Image (cartoon, helix red, strand yellow):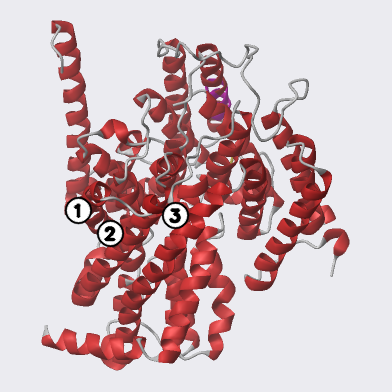
Amino acid sequence: MTGILNDLILGLSIALSPNVLVYAVLGCVVGTLVGVLPGLGPLAGMSLLLPLTFGLTPTTAIVLLAGIYYGAMYGGSTTSILMRIPGETASVVTCLDGYEMARKGRAGPALAIAAIGSFVAGTISVFILMLVAPQIARFALKFGPAEYVGLLTLALLSLSQLSNGSRLRALLMSFVGLSLGMIGIDPLSGYARFTFGIHELADGLGIVPLAVGGFGISEILLSVGAKSPPAIKTPRLRELLPNVEEIKRSVGPCLRGTLIGFAIGLIPGSAHIISSFASYAVERKMSKHPEQFGRGAVEGVAGPESANNAAASSAFVPMLALGLPAGAVPAVMLAALMTHGISPGPKLIQEQPHLYWGFVASMYVGNIVLLILNLPLVGLFVRILRIPYSILYPIILVMCILGVYSVGSSTADLWIMFAAGGAGYFLRRANYDIAPAILGFVLAPMFEMSLRQAFTLSSGSLSIFFQRPIAATMLAAALALILLNFWGLFRRVVLRRSGTKP
Amino acid sequence: MIPMRPLFAKLVSGAIAVTALVFIYGSLKMPLGTVLTPAAGLVPLLLGCGTLLLAIVTIVSPEPAVAEDDPGPESESNETERKDQPYDRRWLPRPLLIMVVLGMIIFAFERAGFILSMLGGCFLILRVVERRPLISSLLISLVLSGSLYLIFSKVLYVTLPGGWLEF
């Protein structure tokens, strides 16, 4: 423990040195801007600025890129809360309750809770990472296709928890989303599925145009189609920060979201969006007032935002400890390090302690910088709501188009966004919730790939799911969840028939 | 919660069911494999069947009661117009107009270029849909398209189509 403290002090001395601190702040500012702009996610921001890091030292390069990553995670919640447009895909879940809080004049507290929750989650995650990174990384490597099937089965079961309306409709939308995820070239066989000869559909529909269209464009269409402008209550100055009740209600979700996000972020290839909606589903299950979810429950912001920030930190664990990037963003960081002749791995801590601990300390410093940057900006962001909606929504529309186009520089993505917006409008007018569809879309390809890979490994035998302990545990938990739900339904039916209130 | 219109909701469920049928038809044309060795078409087929079944159940299920004060989309309402801009009901519905303008922007995006398509699209929305004064519509459109061009192109190095203003 003393050794770790000494190393952390070394790291802090590096992270707080003026030249490193400047790049940390710069990264956070650029990242926040990238996160605020819908569609332009941290990966795009980091990739675009990667060439700029070639002339920097390894420590400053990695600190700059990490700052962009964290900043994007922080910034992504801003447009989710203010405009119901996910700034980046992991913020999709924040749209559900964050925007409803804004409509009730609680935009400031929502933004503040998102920032504070992200800070707490990031701090705790860095602390855990600091202590047990190598051990955790070895556990994460045990995840194979069977384990992914277990994890994703649990995730799929919680899809119906996302909607405040009819469970049947939520399930239908989940299936719609899962089906949309099948579009594109099958990665295992190379077969083109539902592309209709359009080569732009070979890579599938894309989460960004679907999410921006389904949430953002449909929201604009619903709002302009309403008889009166959207009833977004503009908060007074003293209402910009959360009250004591909101803070108390956020503590538990924040801590739980941190643990959930950290655990899921460790798993190579897992999407951060899974961590945020897993947290949402857990908070909704644990809440004494689940009916408030989808209507501005602060837990629905605190938990998911903490989860996705914790996932952002833990995603670096396999990269730092084992030299294996757990996703696209750590892969960009790895590329930045390799251009400087550094190969992360088990020996990084011994051979480059100033780089390793400097990076770990800069993650903590970055969280503080983002909190200092974002909390005062809450008042500024909330002022956006004062703009007359007839001027605001064209701005939002243009930002949506730019954000989606910047992902792949393709008008096909814009047309997908257009179609998703139109479909989302009609679905929402019929009281279908879009969130289960978006998340089903994300999970479908991962689930199908893992399932088919698992069957290939086991030569078509189901035994693979029972022989691997992690997979067996997760599938048993999924089965228990299903049985619990059926038991609850059975009890309600019996009690209703006997005339007793459930 | 948006007040529900039962017939409209069932129409949407019907549209989902029809889409599911198309999905099933397409899946059957692909190699299916077996349950324990699924090929490209099996999982889409199962999902299509699940979607169709759920859509049918949704159609035949009773709808929740519509709110008493909900006039529905078909009724003519005497409610006051939006305070910020009067809306002429002889025009097409706003959402449809927005979608038309959005379609025009996307169509022109790579042909005319980012600046011209955004400028034209914003101006159409502000002037034609929102009936804002000419000068303010033009000014807002210019400022918006120009500033976003600067942010995306010069700060974030995102390649934007120049179109007719290629420079």
Q: Tell me which amino acid carries mark 1.
A: Ile
Q: Measuring 33% from the left and 86% from the top, which residue is drawn there?
A: A358
**Circle 3 sits on which residue?**
A77
**Does the stretch in magenta take in B22?**
yes
> What is the distance, in whole Å, between disc 2 and disc 1 at their CAs?
8 Å
Which label belongs to residue A470? 1
Q: Chain of mark 1?
A: A
- The residue that disc 2 covers is A143
What amino acid type should be assigned to the residue bearing mark 2? Phe
- Label the magenta part by its dominant secondary structure: helix
Q: Is residue B108 visible?
A: no
**Residue at the right extreme?**
B164
Label 3 vs label 1: CA separation?
33 Å
Asked if labels 2 and 3 touch by Cβ distance under 8 angstroms, the answer is no
Is residue A413 inside the magenta stretch?
Answer: no
The image position of residue A247, as x and y in percent, is 25, 52
Q: Indicate the quadrant containing the C terminus of chain A: top left, top right, bottom left or bottom right.
A: top left
Residue in the foreground of this view, choosing between B60 and A16: A16
Residue A198 horizontal side relative to residue A231, left or right: right
> Which stretch did the figure color magenta?
B16-23
Q: From the viewer's perspective, is the residue at label 3 or at label 1 nearer?
A: 3
Above or below, A288 relative to A352: above
Q: Chain of mark 2?
A: A
